[in-house]
């Protein structure tokens, strides 16, 4: 990993509050693997002080992409960046999704949790049988569906909480049928905590390999500040940034 | 070119910049970013005798130009740390300082004894000022008598130079610093974090389970600078200035206020190569201001 000042090659609105930023870094784009994230400075000043973590959405050396939703002050500042602006970036950070071949993998994305999954789907779809479940609040929040359909996917299921544009439901609505139908033995998921809780209830005891990529508010991003911890099933805290962000589902102590 | 040497009396450092405890892991985590030999010294994260998990999340909260933390000194315990120290020491010749914690006098003593026999440890920093481990943010550094007792006990049982890290959350920092000096401290490091409170208006609850948390970052720099100036005027042992240092200019301000060296904290979290940048900025600014060495301006405030 490195700390680098990088050129913003593009920063465009995809839809509504959602942006895609294209950042130039030969190092980060070449070193990144699905699951990795970067810490990005949203201001060039001391306020806000902390860099923000973003899962790597796609690479196209010397560029990498981050996909983000404008939700607070940090992401709002990031959205104001223009082409040719410079941003300080630390990365690539964290661990990665395990690499498989010839497995039946199900990707489960909730909202902007699709970001690290997109990279993994792009990379792994050629060598595995991939299915995808992807859900969000409404059709305004369910992005990249057309792009995702271009990958060789065995089955895709899109859901919205309010039924707008796609099937009304949650990512867990038909998950067991989809797992059975496609002989799924591995899942990769990323989304909000509530989604993980329901996923754990639905598929945590099916005896398949479930990997989750967690989101957390972070200080450093590389394991020294001990801020972004989650409770493990062994009772010990795990650092999302450096022990993760990818964990086996059973490593985490879920609320339910 | 200016001479960056920082003289603490008992040791000369190649430069005055020392990453602070709790913001630099155990040093090794930074090897991927830069050569640790570039630093004046560095302080390892505070350690108790036993392994500790730390506080229940949330553990940090961003404030304007600052950071509130309630980490709670998570760590491997002193015996576990000895292996880490040996490993890091094999990769750098920069002096290693270990931050010593204790829930009781006996624990401070035990941790110090474990580290005292390690040739890889250059100095100990006695942490009597962490605000995040006891109820209401209390710590031994809030009382002159507790400070005196703990410092004396540890000093009598270690051969290592002993830096005592003090709390800003006191009414008379000068008298507490003098107590530490009289009890045998070789240097004083000030300040640990300022107690602060973060509130969640939606839930009408404090953000942190521990209620108060420790504020650091550039937001506290003027407060820290004042305390460094007060302590430097109260004691004759070297003072290591800490508090929101982000630039080379900040370093020289702390030296001018009377510090012999400085510790960088929050900057290491937000900018992993920040301490190295600060060292080169300090050198550049000294050249620009025609300052030949740090002693030339240390405590030399024109008033």
Image: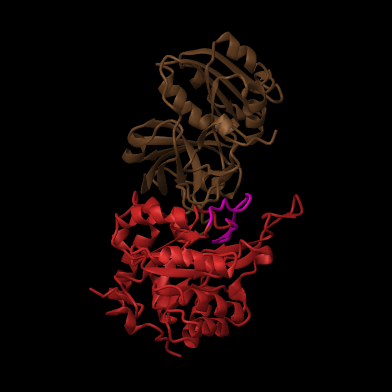
Chain colours: A brown, B red
Residue A3 placement (x, y as % from top left): 37, 49
Give B38 or B64, whichever is nearer the viewer.
B38
Residue B95 placement (x, y as % from top left): 33, 65
When the figure is inspected, residue B281 is found, relative to residue A2, above or below; the finding is below
Residue A75 placement (x, y as % from top left): 55, 45
Q: Residue furthest left?
A: B1
When the figure is inspected, residue B291 is found, relative to residue A93, above or below; the finding is below
Q: Quadrant of the N terminus of chain B?
A: bottom left
Q: Quadrant of residue B81?
A: bottom left
Give A133 or A229, whichever is nearer the viewer.
A229
Give the dominant element type of the magenta stretch: helix, strand or loop: loop
Can residue B19 be seen in the rendering of this structure?
Answer: no
Q: Residue furthest top?
A: A181
On whether residue B27 falls in the magenta region, the answer is no
> Would you say B116 lies left or right of A117 here?
left
**Residue drawn where x is 67% and y is 29% of the image:** A137
**Residue drawn where x is 59% and y is 81% of the image:** B144
On whether residue B53 falls in the magenta region, the answer is yes
Q: Which residues are magenta?
A: B50-71
Residue A66 placement (x, y as % from top left): 47, 37
> Would you say B173 lies left or right of B82 here?
right
Q: Residue furthest right?
A: B204
């Amino acid at each position: 990993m490195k700390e680098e000042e990088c050129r913003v090659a593009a920063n465009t609105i995809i839809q509504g509050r959602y942006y895609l930023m294209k950042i130039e870094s030969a190092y980060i784009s070449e070193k990144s693997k699905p699951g990795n994230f970067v810490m990005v400075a949203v201001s060039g000043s001391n306020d806000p002080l902390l860099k923000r973590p973003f899962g790597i959405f796609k690479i196209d050396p010397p560029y990498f992409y981050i996909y983000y939703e404008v939700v607070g002050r940090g992401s709002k500042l990031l959205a104001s960046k223009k082409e040719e602006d410079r941003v300080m970036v630390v990365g690539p950070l964290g661990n990665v999704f395990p690499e498989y071949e010839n497995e039946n993998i199900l990707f489960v994305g909730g909202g902007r949790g699709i970001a690290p999954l997109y990279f993994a789907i792009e990379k792994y779809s050629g060598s595995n049988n991939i299915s995808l479940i992807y859900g969000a609040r409404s059709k305004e929040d369910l992005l990249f569906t057309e792009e995702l359909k271009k990958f060789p996917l065995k089955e895709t299921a899109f859901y919205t909480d309010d039924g707008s544009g796609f099937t009304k439901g949650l990512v867990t609505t038909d998950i067991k049928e989809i797992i059975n139908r496609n002989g799924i033995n591995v899942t990769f998921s990323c989304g909000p905590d509530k989604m993980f809780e329901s996923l754990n209830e639905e598929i945590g005891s099916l005896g398949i390999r479930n990997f989750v990529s967690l989101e957390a508010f972070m200080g450093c991003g590389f394991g020294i500040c001990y801020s972004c911890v989650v409770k493990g099933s062994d009772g010990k805290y795990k650092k999302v940034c450096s022990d993760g962000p990818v964990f086996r589902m059973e490593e985490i102590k879920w609320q339910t | 070119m200016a001479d960056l040497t920082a003289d603490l009396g008992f040791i000369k450092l190649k430069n005055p910049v020392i990453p602070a405890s709790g913001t630099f892991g155990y040093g090794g985590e930074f090897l991927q970013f830069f050569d640790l030999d570039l630093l004046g010294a560095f302080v390892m994260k505070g350690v108790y005798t036993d392994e500790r998990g730390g506080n229940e999340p949330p553990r940090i909260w961003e404030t304007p130009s600052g950071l509130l933390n309630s980490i709670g000194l998570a760590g491997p315990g002193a015996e576990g740390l000895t292996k880490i120290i040996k490993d890091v020491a094999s990769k750098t010749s920069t002096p290693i300082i270990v931050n010593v914690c204790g829930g009781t006098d006996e624990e401070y003593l035990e941790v110090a004894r474990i580290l005292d026999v390690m040739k890889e440890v250059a100095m100990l920093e006695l942490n009597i000022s962490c605000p995040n481990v006891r109820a209401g943010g209390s710590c031994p550094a809030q009382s002159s008598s507790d400070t005196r007792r703990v410092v004396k006990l540890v000093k009598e049982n270690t051969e290592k130079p002993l830096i005592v890290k003090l709390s800003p959350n006191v009414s008379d920092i000068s008298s507490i610093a003098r107590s530490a000096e009289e009890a045998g401290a070789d240097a004083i490091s000030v300040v640990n974090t300022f107690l602060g409170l973060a509130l969640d208006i939606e839930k009408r609850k404090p953000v942190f389970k521990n209620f108060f948390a420790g504020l650091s970052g550039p937001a506290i720099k003027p407060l820290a600078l004042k305390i460094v100036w007060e302590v430097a005027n109260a004691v004759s042992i070297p003072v290591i200035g800490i508090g929101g240092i982000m630039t080379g200019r900040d370093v020289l301000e702390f030296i001018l206020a009377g510090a012999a060296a400085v510790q960088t904290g929050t900057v290491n979290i937000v900018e992993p190569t920040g301490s190295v940048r600060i060292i080169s900025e300090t050198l550049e600014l000294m050249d620009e201001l025609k300052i030949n060495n740090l002693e030339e301006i240390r405590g030399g405030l024109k008033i």
